[in-house]
Image (spheres, grey):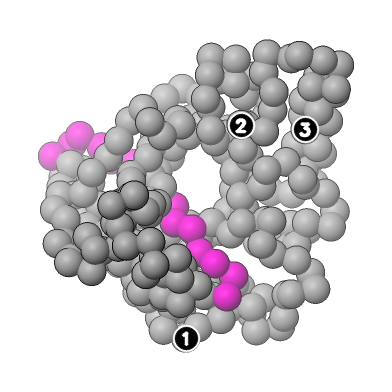
């Protein structure tokens, strides 16, 4: 797995207390070319469980700002490489964001500043939205407007799905997504039964239908075994993300 670390990290006692750790995972194409990097945050067992249990629900804005800060550091470091001739193509930074966070003005301001900062360094910010947490019944005009505004700023969107894609998937038919992350871990490989093979075939057909109707590129996630990697390369995936170890 290719890990990419920023030039420098900012020490934060609060983050250490909560047991927060930041991971940088490369996303590459079929020929090994690098599309970008996903920055994720995880809790360690050493953090305060009482406090961290409410971190995502109560402090999404703070976490997102910290991740955006690291995105700027990461691209700043890669820009130094570009000047030296080591890497001259656009690198995209993928970060996860909760639907509710997109309704907050301070979050939108941070996203706008990050989009502008990355754009100046020939990079792009891609926001990952979890499909399982977004439903049509919970979408509202303000959320859709904010998403379209982010697209106007130059930001991009990605959908994270565990395989349940269809016409009812929120915003999919509006072509606001540029990428779709598919979780390969849900597939049971090697096949143990006809049902396992049927699930694989159904996912394959679903992906083909989406590619034909929407302008999106699929990214394979959680390639936990050789079988998962082989299966992913046989499917219409454009990019691949190695499983974290």
Q: Nearer the viewer, residue 84 or 208?
A: 208
CA distance for labels 2 and 3: 13 Å
Magenta-colored span: 84-100
Q: Residue at x 45, y 30 (%)?
A: 242
Report if the CB atoms under discs 3 and 1 are less than 8 Å apart.
no
Q: Position of residue 111 (x, y in %)?
A: 41, 72
Residue 170: image quadrant is: bottom right
Residue drawn at (13%, 53%), measured in percent from left and top?
A: 8
Q: Is residue 97 magenta?
A: yes
Task: Name the one closer to the observer, 112 or 53.
Answer: 53
Q: Are marks 2 and 1 in contact (CB under 8 Å)?
A: no
Q: Nearer the viewer, residue 84 or 229?
A: 229
Q: Which residue is mark 3?
A: 203
Secondary structure mostly taken by the magenta-highlighted segment of the chain: loop
Labels 2 and 3: the sequence-earlier one: 2
Quadrant that contains the C terminus:
top left
Q: Is residue 70 visible?
A: yes
Instruction: Locate residue 1: give its quadrant.
Output: top left
Q: Residue at left 50%, top 64%?
A: 97
Q: Would you name the residue on which mark 2 appears?
A: 185
Q: Nearer the viewer, mark 2 or mark 3?
A: 2
Name the residue beneath numbered marker 1.
Answer: 105
Q: Tell me the crowding category of disc 3: few under 14, some 14 to 19, or many 20 or more residues within 10 angstroms, Cα based.
A: some
Left or right: 19, with 180 as reference point: left
Which residue is painted at 18% across and 41% down in the image?
81
Give the percent coordinates (x, y) of residue 208.
Answer: 78, 34
């Amino acid at each position: 797995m290719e890990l990419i670390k920023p030039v420098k990290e900012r020490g934060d006692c609060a983050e250490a207390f909560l047991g927060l750790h930041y991971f940088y995972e490369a996303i590459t194409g079929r020929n090994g070319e690098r599309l970008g990097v996903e920055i994720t945050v995880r809790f360690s067992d050493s953090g305060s469980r009482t406090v961290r249990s409410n971190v995502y629900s109560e402090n999404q804005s703070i976490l997102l700002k910290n991740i955006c800060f690291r995105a700027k550091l990461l691209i700043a470091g890669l820009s130094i490489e570009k000047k030296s001739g080591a890497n001259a193509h656009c690198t995209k930074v993928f970060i996860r964001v909760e639907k509710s966070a997109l309704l907050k003005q301070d979050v939108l301001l941070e996203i706008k500043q990050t989009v502008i900062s990355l754009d100046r360094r020939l990079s792009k910010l891609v926001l990952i939205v979890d499909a399982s947490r977004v439903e049509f019944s919970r979408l509202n005009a303000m959320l859709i407007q904010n998403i379209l505004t982010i697209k106007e700023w130059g930001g991009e969107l990605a959908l994270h799905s565990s395989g349940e894609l269809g016409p009812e998937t929120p915003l999919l038919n509006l072509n606001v997504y540029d990428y779709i992350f598919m979780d390969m871990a849900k597939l049971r490989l090697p096949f143990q039964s006809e049902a396992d093979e049927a699930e694989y075939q159904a996912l394959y057909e679903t992906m083909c239908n989406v590619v034909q109707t929407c302008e999106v590129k699929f990214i394979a996630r959680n390639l936990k075994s050789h079988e998962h990697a082989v299966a992913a390369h046989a499917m219409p995936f454009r990019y691949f993300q190695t499983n974290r170890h």
